[in-house]
Image: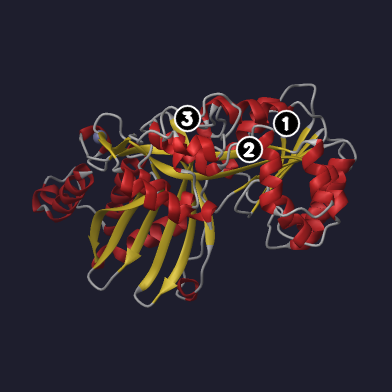
Amino acid sequence: MHSLKENYAQMIAAQKDPRRASWGSAPAVSGATLASDVLNAIFTEAIQSRASDIHLEPFQEWLRVRFRVDGLLYEVLRIPHIHNVTVIARIKISANMSTDAMSARKAMDGRFSMTIGKNEYDFRVATFPTLLGEKLAIRILNKDHGLVDLNKIGLGTTDLACLEKILQRKNGLLIVSGPTGSGKTTTLYAILNRIHTSQVNIVTLEDPVEYQIDGINQCDIDKKDDEAFASGLKAILRQDPNVILIGEIRDLETADIAIRAAITGHLVLTSLHANSAIGTVIRLVNMGLERYMVSYAVIGAVTQRLVPQLCNSCRIPYVLDESVLKVLCEQCGLDIQLFSSDKADHSGKGMQYLDESDQNKIKPIKVTFYKKAGCKNCNNTGYHGRVGIFEVVFFSEDLRDAIIRNASITELETIARQKGFRSIAMDAIEKAKQGLVTVEDIYPILLEKGS
Ligand SMILES: [Zn+2]
């Protein structure tokens, strides 16, 4: 990412270059022109480096510019303090935000669009007042990249087949869960894309609408306004929809309407903050919904995390020492056989638990994993893109019965496993064995599952 620094140096040089003023036709570059040139260079560079966010952070001497690429932040430029204010003001003007002195003391949101290369991008701007000035975080959305094919979001064969089975249902609730920034929206859009035909009426309620999809009725609503969200949802139900996407279930009222819609013949898609796919059900019950209503309405759940994907031009294979593997498994409460190559789960039958007699026959485990290096293809980061780690559960009859009789999560998972459910830990391990991710990067997922 040196080019941005070089471009910037040239722009500063042009501003100071006395020849530019004396040539007559080319006037000296004003502060505003410089700000606009610098920003164009930053935005273009951000797109070229596949950044998802741009951070502009004020310090005593300079404004630090960082890009988030594949989930990680990298410093790309330092702009001397004197240009701070013009650069920030320029962005705020583009995003239709107030630039008066008072506005610098409160957090604000705005957005603007820009065409870079052949694509149109949306930039969502959020300001935050700090002691040293305003900090800006800019989320980049590629309008043309909204629709991802369901086959391409990184689901394993078993998980994809399970999700497709769920999507054949005409009614019920399908929940996608995971922390912020785990790719839930991409998955929901990919699902919409899959079920979108001229025969179905799809209506969405989102905050905000991230990507516009032709032929789908999308409604942008402020989720901070709970009342507007719930009344928007009621209005949607009067629009004779087949499929309803509710951006996020955040409160009991929204959850209640979603469940009722799912029971009365609609396919309802939504997202929820929950750690595991089966955990989403418990979450809904804890929100105050009737257990039998939840078990009746929920047909499937997906949970996901996003992990940096190893650059396959420079990743380095290595064999993880079995003693290290043992410690890892103990820490995470995992069966070490999950890491064995012979026991790799390609069958779709899920994890096979071994009984005592099998344990004695176990051969030493030797698994090849990959670590990151760095090359020119990946800007020396060792990563290229991100990969989703998933778990998908189909709520079978047995599972629904177990939910009604208040079974524990462990019990629910055992029932699901008998039907072919693969946990997120298993998907993570599988993807590490395939060399898509490092063991270090999936460690938090393994640890979380084990706890
Ligand atoms: Zn590389």
Single out the residue that lies furthest toward the top.
198
Q: Are marks 1 and 2 in contact (CB under 8 Å)?
A: yes
For discs 2 and 3, the disc positioned in front in the rendered view: 3
The crowding category of the residue bearing disc 1, from other C-alpha atoms within 10 Å (few below 14, some 14 to 19, many at least 20), is many
Task: Name which residue type carries label 3.
Answer: Lys
Q: Residues within 10 Å of mark 2 (few under 14, many from 20)?
A: many
Reading the image, the residue beneath label 3 is 343
Q: Quadrant of residue 351?
A: top right
SS for dot 2? strand
Which dot marks residue 402? none
Residue 339: x and y, percent?
Answer: 42, 37
Quarter of the image where ligand 1 sits: top left
Is the distance from the Cβ of mark 1 to the nearest ligand 1 atom less than 8 Å? no
Residue at the image point whose x is 11% and y is 49% from the top: 22
| Image disc number at residue 166 | 1
Which residue does the image show at 22% across and 41% down from the upper left?
A: 380
Is residue 51 placed above or below 230 in the rendered structure?
Answer: above
User: Would you call the spot at circle 3 few (<14 residues within 10 Å), some (14-19), or many (20 or more)?
Assistant: few
Rendered view: 78 above or below 305:
below
Q: Earlier in the sequence, mark 2 or mark 3?
A: 3
Between circles 1 and 3, the one closer to the viewer is 3
Q: CA distance from mark 1 to mark 2?
A: 10 Å
For label 2, the residue is: 392
Residue 161 located left or right of residue 377: right
Q: Amino acid at mark 2?
A: Val
Residue 3 in percent (x, y) is at: 20, 42
Q: Which numbered disc, 1 or 2, marks the residue that appears first in the sequence? A: 1
Quadrant position of the N terminus in the picture? top left
Q: How is the image coloured?
A: secondary structure
Q: CA distance from mark 2 to mark 3?
A: 21 Å
How far is disc 1 from disc 3 in space, using C-alphas?
27 Å
From what the image shows, is residue 333 above or below residue 199?
below
